[in-house]
Every structure is written in structure tokens, then in C-alpha cells.
Amino acid sequence: MNEKQLIKWLGMICILAGIARMGMTPTSIIWGTDSPQELTFGFIACVLMAVGTIVTYMVQSRETGVAGFITTLLIIVANIITGAMVWSLFAAGPGAPMPEGPLVNISRLIMMAGLMGGSLVFAILTFRAKVFPRWVPALLILMLVNIFLPVADNKFFAAFWGLAYVGMGYCVWAGKLNAGAAARKDGTLSA
């Protein structure tokens, strides 16, 4: 498998991750927050996002540089920690109290900083890089703004988060990147 094929398949993983993340919203509305159905979608999304997010850096690495790499790593680590926290809810069983303690608090802090801060900086870098269409960083900002909607348990946050990943993955999979910005010095396209 060459680099172009790898990038394309990682784009498909982003699409699947986004669909899984969006699945959290209806399951949360129907069966409730932290229901087994919602947590299943969430855990699958975390695993796929932890793997697929790297492609969002790969296609614009020249334009985003070290800052893009660091924010991508922050987002990946945040997804890994989120996946671990979701798994701990599965392990505890239904109706169990939420885990507490210093390690949980530190994990939540890293997760929130990585997800929120990393996504905000990544959206700005992506906008400036001009590799993805402008609506992709707009979806990332919309995801972050959604946190402040007065909706119980931020039930719609996952839908917007997933939509952003579906958008990024689609652009990579379908080759809808701005060719001029994504062209490598050797003349081959990143996607």
C-alpha cells in the first residue's frame, strides 16, 4: 500500500468515526445519557478517531508544520483518554457511580484541553493552510460553539463533532482537497 492509498483509507476511517460519533446523539436522546447504546457508539468513535485523526495532519503537514502536528497529537491523546473513560463506565456496569479521584480529574483535564484547545488551534491552522475547503474548519468551530448551547448534557455536541469528522474524511477520501495547497514538492498529491 502506497502513501496515497493509506491517506485515502485513513480518510474513510475518519468518515466512519464521524458516523459513529453522530450515533451518540440519537441514542442519548432515546435511551438516555451514558446508556449502553450511547457508550457503544462513543467507544467505537474514540477508537476510530484516535486512528483516523492523523490523516488530517498528513494532508496538510507542510502548511501546518509542527503546530499542526502537536495539535493533532493532542486531539489523538484526548480521544484515547475519552475512550478509556468510556470503557471505565462499561466496566463499572449500569447504574454505578462515576469514577472519582485525582487520576480521573487529571485525565478529564487533559481530555478537555486536548479536545477543546487542540480542536480550536487545529481549526485555525486548517483555515490558514487552505488545504481543506473553508467549510471544514467552520464545522470544527461550530462543534466547539455547540458546547455553549443550553441543552441538557450537551446531547447535540456529538452530532456536530461527528459531522466535522465526516466532512474531513470525505474531503480526503474523495480527493476534494485544494490541489495547489496540498501538492508536494515532488509533484504528487497528498490525497
Image (tube, grey):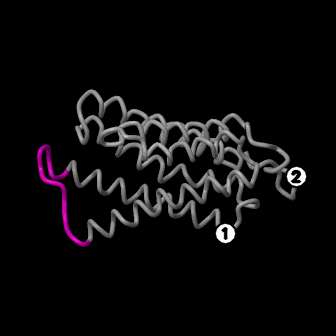
Residue 39, how many percent across, how many down?
29, 42
Residue position for label 1? 66
Residue 91, how many percent across, how many down?
19, 52
Alpha-carbon neighbours of circle 2 within 10 Å: few (<14), some, or many (≥20)? Answer: few
Residue 118, how many percent across, how many down?
53, 60
Residue position for label 2? 187
**Residue 71 colored magenta?**
no
Residue 131, how many percent across, how many down?
75, 48
Q: Label 2's element? A: loop
Foreground mark, 1 or 2, reads: 1
Q: Which mark is drawn over residue 113?
A: none
Give the dominant element type of the magenta stretch: helix, strand or loop: loop
Q: Amino acid at mark 2?
A: Gly
Q: Residue furthest bottom?
A: 102
Q: Which residues are magenta?
A: 91-102
Question: Left or right: where does residue 103 sit relative to residue 76?
Answer: left
Q: Label 1's element? A: helix
Residues 148 and 125: in front is: 148
**Residue 93 colored magenta?**
yes
Give the quadrant of residue 110: bottom left
Alpha-carbon neighbours of circle 1 within 10 Å: few (<14), some, or many (≥20)? Answer: few
Residues 72 and 116: in front is: 116
Residue depicted at 60% across the width and 40% down the height: 169
Q: Amino acid at mark 1?
A: Val
Residue depicted at 69% across the width and 34% down the height: 174
Residue depicted at 19% across the width and 60% down the height: 99
Residue depicted at 57% across the width and 46% down the height: 140
Question: Left or right: where does residue 174 sit relative to residue 95?
Answer: right
